[in-house]
Image (cartoon, helix red, strand yellow):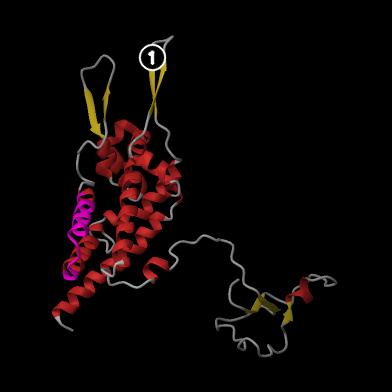
Amino acid sequence: MTDRDQVERGHRAALLAFLPRARRVEAHSLAQDRAALVALAQMTMQVVIDPARETQTVVQELPPEEVVESAAARLRPLILDEDPTHWGKFFKAVGYFLHAGQVPPSAMEHLKGLKAEWVAIKPRSEVLRGYEVHLSKAGSNESQRVTDNVLGFAWLYGDVVHSDADRLARTRSFGVAERFRAAAPLVAHIMVLTIATLNFARTLYANGWLPVEDEVFETPVVVSDTTFRHEGRIYLGEPHIGDDPVVVPPPGQDLGEGWLPIQQVFGPGSDGAAPGGTAQSETSAPT
């Protein structure tokens, strides 16, 4: 294998790692209403004005924490440097194949724009994404302030997928509610960006610019039906004694003495007394 073959093999592996993970993010329930997802990412809030009391209330409605938590678990590998699915590895691979394929400048500009948005995601930065929170004690000159980026990633890496003591200590005074309030739009933003990147990859593939197979976009990546049915025949036998594995004939052959069809034991007219505790089944493909 030549050096070029090895390089291309590595880049192709990056594509095959990123794309199925991105599809899992796309399939998450939080992403099914795209307009709502975008609104969440944009930190949409309402201001309720009470003229009589001369007060204003800012209302920010967020999804349940468990929903955001499961979405965060799906996308976390995409922002983890050492993970094969990391967005940086994907963009490096796409850039390699686009340069090799001499694609139109518009495709390269689109790639550059998407990459810039990913670069702006900084888990260790104190950058202000949308707002910052100030905390002070009554009658005291002491105060604390923290940006939403710090709070959001503290929730992700402190409350959810890890237990980062430093991040939690940095934001302890603000509490888990403030951390979650900052994290929900952050997670939504990364989801929107992931789906946009996935759709861009689909366009590149449709034009023959990505060396992957149809399966990477078509093979199921999530479980939608969680009721499993296996049709077949079940037999009951005497309890197995000893450490040796149970030896039974292959499906279709006679089981021999000591085995009864389950309906003879528990079916109509039976006494309900099982002959033992060992079961053998002959099953067809799942239905």
- The residue that appears at 21% across and 66% down in the rendered structure is 93
Q: Is residue 259 left or right of residue 148?
A: right
Residue interval drawn in magenta: 100-116
Q: Is residue 100 left or right of residue 194?
A: left
Q: Main secondary structure of the magenta part?
A: helix
- The residue that appears at 30% across and 58% down in the rendered structure is 200
- Residue 123 position within the rendered picture, expressed as x and y whole percent measured from the top left: 23, 46
For residue 168, what is the image quadrant? top left
Question: What residue did someone put label 1 on?
Answer: 55
- The residue that appears at 27% across and 64% down in the rendered structure is 84
Judging depth in this view, the residue of 284 and 91 nearest the camera is: 91
Q: Can you say whether 49 is above or below 40 in the image?
A: above
Membership of 86 in magenta stretch: no
Judging depth in this view, the residue of 211 and 48 nearest the camera is: 211
Judging depth in this view, the residue of 180 and 266 nearest the camera is: 180
Membership of 106 in magenta stretch: yes
Query: Total marks drawn?
Result: 1
- Residue 186 position within the rendered picture, expressed as x and y whole percent measured from the top left: 31, 43
The disc labelled 1 sits on which kind of residue?
Thr
For residue 284, what is the image quadrant? bottom right
Q: Can you say whether 47 is above or below 149 in the image?
A: above
- Residue 137 position within the rendered picture, expressed as x and y whole percent measured from the top left: 28, 20
Extreme residue in the left direction:
3
